[in-house]
Image (cartoon, grey):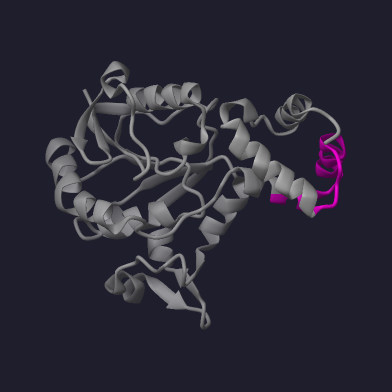
Amino acid sequence: MLGTYEAFKQSIYDMTKIDLNSYKERQMKRRIEALITKHNINSYLDYVNKLKTDKSAYDEFINYITINVSEFFRNPEQWALLEKEVIPYLMDRFSKDLKIWSAACSTGDEPYSLVMLLSKFVPLNKIKIIATDIDKQVMDKAKAGFYNEKSLKGLPDDFLKKYFAKINDKTYQISDSVKSCVEFKQHDLLKDTYPTNCDLIVCRNVLIYFTDEAKNKIYSDFNKALKKDALLFVGSTEQIIQAQQIGFSNFKSFFYKKA
């Protein structure tokens, strides 16, 4: 393929401030080359030129490389643990007015799941979730709140009946009462300032795509963003290697406590 991947990464950084060096190269390169092939383009250089002049191609690229795969209550057994043990621990330790950050929130499935789960403990008007993602496009989808059946397959029936309106055979929209509990902000985990004094940070199935160096930086920054004894909730394929060196101890499976 004409043009070097190194030059391509620099061009993308200049355009978007997304640093592709922080992503695992083989996975990211494969995703990008699939996009290039889809557009019948033969070089990285020509693809960069297309991204500069074609907004739909640019939006597609951002959406594709930021890896937006999400669903409500993904890995239900972990959400059951969150309900039965984690939230009661947090409320006992920090009060019912929890500061929760859903990092790399994608299309909003995760922060909205958090709102619905918390509604079992406190009224909706007492819930506020900070939700961030690098991709403005997916956050726009999240704010609109339309979801297909596939995204909702893990959603408990009582939540579906209570908080969703059926738009057509395959599409549902989440209620404004749930949407109003979430504040969406664009945020880059590698370079932007983190929220502070969080009681719970949820960041799942995202860091698997980053290099070890980038992961360690993010986990360290998460640690600084948490209160003492507060928790980080990670994905089912993720674990923090040498967690103690970063300042975490194991709390439960997929939950780490700030030491």
Q: Nearer the viewer, residue 91 or 4?
A: 4
In this view, 149 is above or below 180: below
Image check: 203 left or right of 81?
A: right
Q: Residue 19: in sight, yes or no? A: no
Residue 51 lies within the magenta run: yes
Q: Could you tell me residue 189's position as x and y percent?
A: 50, 31
Question: Measuring 74% from the left and 27% from the top, which residue is drawn there?
Answer: 14
Q: Residue 192: in sight, yes or no? A: yes
Question: Measuring 75% from the left and 29% from the top, which residue is drawn there?
Answer: 5
In this view, 154 is above or below 218: below
Q: Quadrant of the N terminus?
A: top right
Q: Could you tell me residue 194's position as x and y percent?
A: 44, 29
User: In the current view of this chain or complex, which residue is farthest to the bottom?
Assistant: 169
Q: Could you tell me residue 223's position as x and y percent?
A: 33, 25
Q: Nearer the viewer, residue 46 or 229?
A: 46
In this view, 154 is above or below 190: below
Report how many numbered discs are placed on residues in the image: 0
Q: Which residues are magenta?
A: 39-60
Q: Nearer the viewer, residue 14 or 121?
A: 14
Image check: 41 left or right of 215?
A: right
